Image (cartoon, helix red, strand yellow):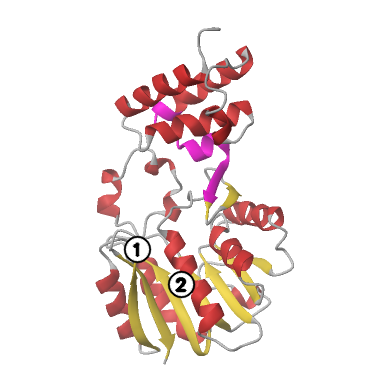
Amino acid sequence: MSEWTLKKLLDWTSRYFSEAHLEQPRLAAEILLAHVLGCPRIDLYVRFDSCPPPDALSRFRELVKRAAAQEPVAYLTGRAHFFSLEFEVTPAVLIPRPETEILVAAAIDFCRHETRRPTVDVLDLCTGSGCVAVAIASQVVEVELVASDRSKAALEIARRNIEKHDLQARISVCQSDLFDALGQAPKAVFDLIVANPPYIARGDYEQLPANVRREPDEALLAGEDGLEIQRRIAAGAGDFLADDGCLLVETAYDQADRVTALFQQAGTLKAIQTIKDNLGHQRVVKARKA
């Protein structure tokens, strides 16, 4: 076992993960090894020639097997990074993704530059892990948020992430299927509504990578056309937006035109536009209350 230096472990595991068709195999190997060693990833590179303790090596091998069987690395470590923040994640919530940072950036821009309210009231629909709400609140002090989800299990994770970042004074949670139970929330009208809803069509589900299909169905699937949740958001948002309030909704890379049409049909939204992600896809649809 002493011959397994950190460098040899990373090189071998990276090749193994490549053969198992994991995305970013080297990164996955580094995350798992740093996790079992209890150190930052960067420390691996200054300890290349050292050997892990036997118990750490045993735990690493077990995690490698599970990852190669398409169990998401974030679930194996219980952690994910989003907007330069660390979040707890479990199989009860969707794993935060880089494209959702576009939604957060648009929300922050609105709070800082597009409203003059001294305190901006924000509703985060489909909050999941709470990553969107926490990221917004971490960057903008003058916001108060309601993080909403229909999943009780997801809200427990969101609550823990809110407390982890010491934001419980400005973020409350509410169990609600979109707008259905918002009467229980501390606010009834919002200057900004943000949502990263499910948007996978039922027929596309089997085409998703195997590790993505390990994530909760209710955080992925949105009916036959993938627009079931966006349709409900478009229809109901007007009743919960303040005058000239803003709606921001993340979409799949090829859905923006259809979501824009839903916003237009709602009759309560105006100034509809889209925001591109770093790959040039129209990722977020934005509208103001008519």
Judging depth in this view, the residue of 137 and 94 nearest the camera is: 137
Q: Is residue 91 above or below residue 158?
A: above
The quadrant of the image that shows the C terminus is: bottom left
Q: Residue at x 46, y 61 (%)?
A: 101
Q: CA distance from mark 2 to mark 1?
A: 11 Å
Q: Categorize mark 1 by other alpha carbons within 10 Å: few (<14), some (14-19), many (20+).
A: some
Q: Residue at x 38, y 43 (%)?
A: 212
Q: Which residues are magenta?
A: 67-81
Q: Residue at x 66, y 77 (%)?
A: 142
Q: In the displayed image of the protein, which residue is found farthest to the front?
A: 46
Q: Amino acid at mark 1?
A: Asp
Would you name the residue on which mark 2 appears?
106
Q: In the rendering, at what x and y percent does residue 245 appear?
A: 50, 86
Q: Residue at x 25, y 52 (%)?
A: 203
Q: In the rendering, at what x and y percent does residue 190 appear?
A: 57, 82
Task: Tell me which label, 2 or 1, sits earlier in the chain.
Answer: 2
Would you name the residue on which mark 1 appears?
277
Q: Categorize mark 2 by other alpha carbons within 10 Å: few (<14), some (14-19), many (20+).
A: some
Q: Quadrant of residue 222?
A: bottom left
Q: Amino acid at mark 2?
A: Ala
Look at the image and say whether residue 71 sits in the magenta stretch. Answer: yes
Judging depth in this view, the residue of 226 and 120 nearest the camera is: 120
Judging depth in this view, the residue of 141 and 63 nearest the camera is: 141
Q: Is residue 242 above or below residue 153?
A: below
Look at the image and say whether residue 13 sits in the magenta stretch. Answer: no
Instruction: Confirm whether residue 179 shows in the render.
Output: no
Q: Secondary structure at mark 2?
A: helix
The quadrant of the image that shows the N terminus is: top right
